Amino acid sequence: MNEAQQSALELDGGVVGFAVVGRDEEPIGEVMRVSLDGVCLLVASHKGLLGRNKEHAIHSSVITGIDPDTETITVARTREQVEHAPEYSNLDHSSTEKVAGYYA
């Protein structure tokens, strides 16, 4: 994916259920939803307390590839980096900016 494609990338619900893999080829989780503005993936990783999925935000700027055949999205960050991303909320208009700043 070249830089122009990456900056124009707008995600949609068609990627829900895709596996997300980090630059270290370690699985990160599964896309549970896409932000309302179509800029962030909300990815469920390992089960947290009480067996609930923990959701992490991934900004589209770090997506390096989307393979519809294998339903896999690769990102230019490690699982650990994704797990430390700030929380995302569709109700907080600054969430996208916070996530973008974290991944910059």
Image (cartoon, grey):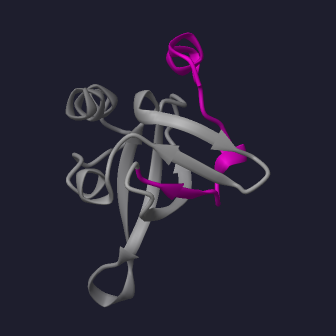
Stretch in magenta: 1-22
Where's residue 58, x and y in %? 39, 43
In the displayed structure, 37 sits above or below 21; it is above
As for residue 35 lying within the magenta part, the answer is: no
Of 41 and 82, nearer the camera is 82
Residue drawn at 53 percent across, 21 percent down: 6
User: Where does residue 35 sit, x and y in percent of width and height?
Assistant: 49, 39
Q: In this view, does 55 lie above or below 35?
A: below
Residue lying furthest top: 4
In percent of the image, x 57 and y 48: which residue is there? 73
Q: In which quarter of the image is the N terminus?
A: top right
Image quadrant of residue 96?
Answer: top left
Spot the residue most to the bottom. 50
Q: Is residue 22 left or right of residue 16?
A: left
- Give the quarter of the figure containing the C terminus: top left
Query: Along the line of sight, which residue is nearer the eye, 97 or 6?
Result: 6
* Position of 59 relative to 72 (above/below): above
Q: How many marks?
A: 0
Q: Where is residue 91 in the image (x, y as percent from the top left)?
A: 36, 39
Say above or below: 104 vs 42. above
Q: In which quarter of the image is residue 26?
A: bottom left
Name the outermost residue toward the right: 69
Q: Nearer the viewer, residue 35 or 24?
A: 24
99 horizontally vs 62: left or right = left
What residue sits 58% from the left and 38% below the top? 65
